Image (cartoon, grey):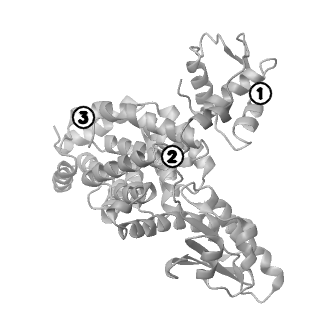
Amino acid sequence: MPLQPQVFDLLLYLITERDRVVSKDDLIGRIWSDRIVSDSALNSRINAARKALGDDGSTQRLIKTIARKGFRFVGEVREEAAASCAQAEAEGTPPRVVDRPAVAVLAFENLSGDPAQDYFGDGISEDILTALSKQRWFTVIARNSSFTYKGRAVDIRQIAEELGVRYVVEGSVRKADNRVRITAQLNDAVSGRHLWAERYDRELVDVFAVQDEITNAIAAAIEPQIHAAENVRSRRKPPLSLDAWDLLMRALSHYWRVTRQDHDAARALLERALTIDPNYGQALSLLAVNDMFGVHLGWVELAVVAPAAEAAALAALRCDHEDSWAHAALGSVCFSTRRLADALSEFEQALALNPNFSLAEGYYALALCYAGRPKDSFEAAQRAIRLSPRDPSLAVYHGIAAYARFTERRYEEAIALAREAIRHRGDLTGAYRVLAVCAGMTSDGALAEMALGELRRTQPGISLHWISTQLPWANDADREHYLEGFRRAGLR
């Protein structure tokens, strides 16, 4: 049976420890490595383990909940010898190695003139290195290697050759009194070009808070810049020499454009990548995310793509259950198939694995709104916007924030946010939906006519029937509020 790796680990742990009651803390320590986990995430995994065994929360035939104590596996167990993994692997085909780019983070230079301040720059560098390591799309060189260049004037091309990297992150720290200025830049280590640079000026009220804020901002900014650079690099290669990574980067650039044509182009490229490497986790994740976003925007039928998308997301998790993209992919499938509690759990897991994952934060915001939590949704969307202000999906985050404000009946704010989304991405279907329903509720005929016209252009099949049957609200009142806005705007 296909099982999410985390559910399998939880089930195995309960069976192994069947002689005792396993507490919630035991499970969090063993399965989640003591990360902060919501009750909904834990309950989702317990329910999934029960379902795999033909059990459920009512009968508790095999996995019992012991009130205020924890859980215990109570079924009979017979242990048998199994074929060794080594033998199974020897009989199979070894996976193809994907040529992912490598990144080195150099120690940030201390420009304060005080050697005692070296710790601050080193701390920033180490935190950025740790944050980037959570991105499974590229390799990050270990600190012991990248910090050997500290205090030395070395050309980044030499660093690229010696460390075998394509990109180098470097920067500086200057402290004066209670203020600090931090600069960071991302370099193409092969060509020597600067790809991205930013300066951060802060007051040092809380050193660690400032360090965390800047680290998160830098890490969130670097990932899309590397993806963009890799896309440009792949487009310079002859079509016949493209590998799975090149195809993935091209697909990602189409996915970010959020149009129906780009949705189809991304899918075709991902299918080519998976033909080269069927077990390519990132391609499987993006395929599922792309398909489910297409469902939400009315470009593809849920029944047609959902089974394959879920299979792709589960396969991505089997490739690497610590990959935040894989959890976001499964979350997007659960969202579109009306399993909102499971969707929230998967997005929370994605963010626990990579707190700087703005896309997961944005999708989490969308699921929160449909789950009837618009205030939490708006806050999550704002976090995504703050986290990555240059993000290719920035328009989507503004659109989600707009929908959260509509749900709260704050129509003028929703209109302003939807217009901001359209300013970033003129073909954004979701933003035109919000404009249309807000126009309906505020009796703005001119805005309603414009929004519906653009919406029919980007989603030709839009109708009240499609809205009422295809979007996954938890509350009937929220669905009716949305439909009423469309009715007043003139949609039939």
Disc 1 on helix, strand or loop? loop
Looking at the image, which residue is at 73% across and 76% down?
Answer: 121
Q: Identify the residue under disc 1.
A: 23
Decide: is 492 above or below 421: above
Q: Nearer the viewer, residue 18 or 298?
A: 18
Looking at the image, which residue is at 46% across and 45% down?
Answer: 285
Disc 2 on helix, strand or loop? helix
Decide: is 478 above or below 357: above
Q: Amino acid at mark 3?
A: Trp
Q: Identify the residue under disc 2.
A: 281
Marked residue nearer the N-terminal end (2 or 1):
1
Spot occupied by residue 18 in the image (x, y as percentages of width and height): 77, 18
Q: Measure the C-alpha gap from mark 1 to mark 3.
A: 45 Å
Quarter of the image that includes the C terminus:
top left
Q: Amino acid at mark 2?
A: Gly
Q: Which mark is residue 466?
A: 3
Marked residue nearer the N-terminal end (1 or 3):
1
Marked residue nearer the N-terminal end (2 or 3):
2
As drawn, which residue projects farthest toward the front?
Answer: 91
Q: Measure the C-alpha gap from mark 2 to mark 3.
A: 32 Å
Frontmost of labels 2 and 1 is: 2
Q: Is residue 68 visible?
A: no
